[in-house]
Structure formats: C-alpha cells, structure tokens
Image: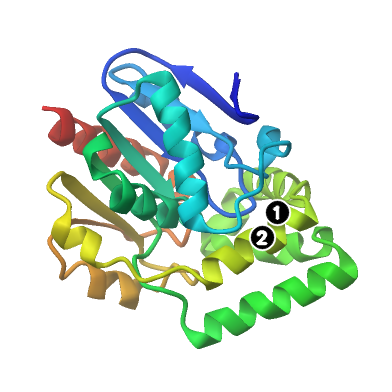
C-alpha cells in the first residue's frame, strides 16, 4: 500500500510499532522481527522516500522534511500514539519525529544509531562517496559498504544475507544516495530529545559497530535512556543477533505500552 507514494505494509493488530530502515536499505531488513512483533502489536514497515518501493515519492532534502512526510502517513493511518524504531539513518529520522511531534509517540528506539551530528571526518567521507557515486554510479560502492556493516565473523556465516542486502543497496537511485548523504551531513545533534521526551527510550549498540562507534554509544548511554549492548554484532544486529533483537524489542514494546 502507498500514501503519497510512500510504500508501507501493516502486520498484526494492537498498539502501533513503526519500523524505519537505514541508508540504502528497505523495509526488508525488518521482515523477521516484524513477524514476531506482529503477534502482539500492529507493525508498520515503510520504505523511506526514495528507497525500495517508495522511489516515486517526493525525495526529501532534509531529515526534518522526511519526518514530516512520515508523520503525514501516521496521521493517515491513525497511528497515534506509536512506538518508533529506527535503524541507523532511520534513527536520525526517528529523533526528528520525536523532536517535531512528541505527542504522537509513546516511545522510541535507536537501533545502531546516534543522536550526535556527523564529525568532520564523517562529513568528508560522505562527500567522497557522493563524488565517487556521481562519477561511477552507486553500484560499485555496495560490495564493500554492505559487508562492512557486519562483524568479520558474521560476514562469513551470514553470507547469503550480506549478498541479498548488497543487491538491494545497488538499486538505490543516485539522486536518493546523494540527497540522504547531504541530509545526514547537515543534520543537527539531538541529544536533548533524550532529556525532553517523556516516553520510553532505548539505545541498541553493536560492540563491533564501525558505522556508529561503540565509544559514541557509551557516551549517549549516559543520558536518561535504556541501553542494550549486542556483544556479537556490528551494525546489523537484527541479523547478527536475531533472537536477542526480537527479545529486546518485544520487552521494550511491553514496557512502552504496558
């Protein structure tokens, strides 16, 4: 189903749980977790504007704008108040949703994500990626980028998953790749959301994550927020420690909705 060309699918019944995927991903990353959550809750998976089956949606030029698009979908589906779970880029958008529309949410989870803005080093890396993609296309970047989201051990044992996600990432349009890179570079730090939001809060960190460093996650955990460490994961804990991810999100959902 679509709303303003944003693809979404709904599973289960009950209190709403909105799942937001990360950069160069689609809702597919949540499929197995969504099946388990949908036994107890109404689960809404979306493809962010520009990705997957939402490629015809209006491409946001900022994370604030993307959050407004998703909030419009939530109003259309009457998803208030919801729990929102965001992976990586999806976590940045989650924080914008909470900042702009706190009354629409009971809780949020940052899944391998951060409230900190990009460092100068990270911004330069994004600029280099944009230049490379404009000259060579998105496709050549993905066979390196996607495997590096997994720890070395999991990269081997989950080879089929890595290959599947690499093929999905290759389908990212150049315009989407560039727009979100720029939006992530320009995003503000939103640590104050931890302090100001009255609902439940959870940060999930991968011990071996190179995209969102464990050191940064530890700094964030000093804020008033629940903290879960995935000892055997890098950036893709929903695959690397699937059972722990299911149990963690089910427990947090129960805490959020009672």
Return the residue nearer the eye: 139 or 198. Answer: 198
Element on which disc 2 rests: helix
State whether residue 105 appears in this view. no
User: Percent x, y for residue 136?
Assistant: 89, 68
Residue 38 lies in quadrant: top left
Q: Is residue 32 left or right of residue 181?
A: left
User: Percent x, y for residue 29?
Assistant: 54, 40
User: In this rendering, is residue 200 above or below 147?
Assistant: above
User: Percent x, y for residue 191?
Assistant: 26, 67
How packed mark 1 is, by other alpha carbons closer than 10 Å (few <14, some 14-19, many 20 or more), is some
Q: Is residue 37 left or right of residue 44?
A: left
Q: CA distance from mark 2 to mark 1?
A: 5 Å
Instruction: Identify the residue at image location x=51%, y=51%.
Output: 65
Instruction: Identify the residue at image location x=28%, y=27%.
Output: 80
User: Percent x, y for residue 123?
Assistant: 57, 80
Instruction: Identify the residue at image location x=78%, y=46%.
Output: 171
The label shown at residue 258 is none
Return the residue nearer the eye: 246 or 132. Answer: 132
User: In this rendering, is residue 52 above or below 173?
Assistant: above
Element on which disc 1 rests: helix
Quarter in which the N terminus is drawn = top right
Q: Is residue 150 left or right of residue 197?
A: right
State whether residue 39 appears in this view. yes
Residue furthest toward the bottom? 120
Quarter in which the C terminus is drawn = top left
Give the residue number, with chain letter if any, for mark 1: 176
Question: Mark 2 and 1 residues: CB-CB less than 8 Å, in contact?
Answer: yes
Give the residue number, with chain letter if any, for mark 2: 179
Residue furthest toward the right? 136
How packed mark 2 is, by other alpha carbons closer than 10 Å (few <14, some 14-19, many 20 or more), is some
Return the residue nearer the eye: 46 or 209. Answer: 46
């Amino acid at each position: 189903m679509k709303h303003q060309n944003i693809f979404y699918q709904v599973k289960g019944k009950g209190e709403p749980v909105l799942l937001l995927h990360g950069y160069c991903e689609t809702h597919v990353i949540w499929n197995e977790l969504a099946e388990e959550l949908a036994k107890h809750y109404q689960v809404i998976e979306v493809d962010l504007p520009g990705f997957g089956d939402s490629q015809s949606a209006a491409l946001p030029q900022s994370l604030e704008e993307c959050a407004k698009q998703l909030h419009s979908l939530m109003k259309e589906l009457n998803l208030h108040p919801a729990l929102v779970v965001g992976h990586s880029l999806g976590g940045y958008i989650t924080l914008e949703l909470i900042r702009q529309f706190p009354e629409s949410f009971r809780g949020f989870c940052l899944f391998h994500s951060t409230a900190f803005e990009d460092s100068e080093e990270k911004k330069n890396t994004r600029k280099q990626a944009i230049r490379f993609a404009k000259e060579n296309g998105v496709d050549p970047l993905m066979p390196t980028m996607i495997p590096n989201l997994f720890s070395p051990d999991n990269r081997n044992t989950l080879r089929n998953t890595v290959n599947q996600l690499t093929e999905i990432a290759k389908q990212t349009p150049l315009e989407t790749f560039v727009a979100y890179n720029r939006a992530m570079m320009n995003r503000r730090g939103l640590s104050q959301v931890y302090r100001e939001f009255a609902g439940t809060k959870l940060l999930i960190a991968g011990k071996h994550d190179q995209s969102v460093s464990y050191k940064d996650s530890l700094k964030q955990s000093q804020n008033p927020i629940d903290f879960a460490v995935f000892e055997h994961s890098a950036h893709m804990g929903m695959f690397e420690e699937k059972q722990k991810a299911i149990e963690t999100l089910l427990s947090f959902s129960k805490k959020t909705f009672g």
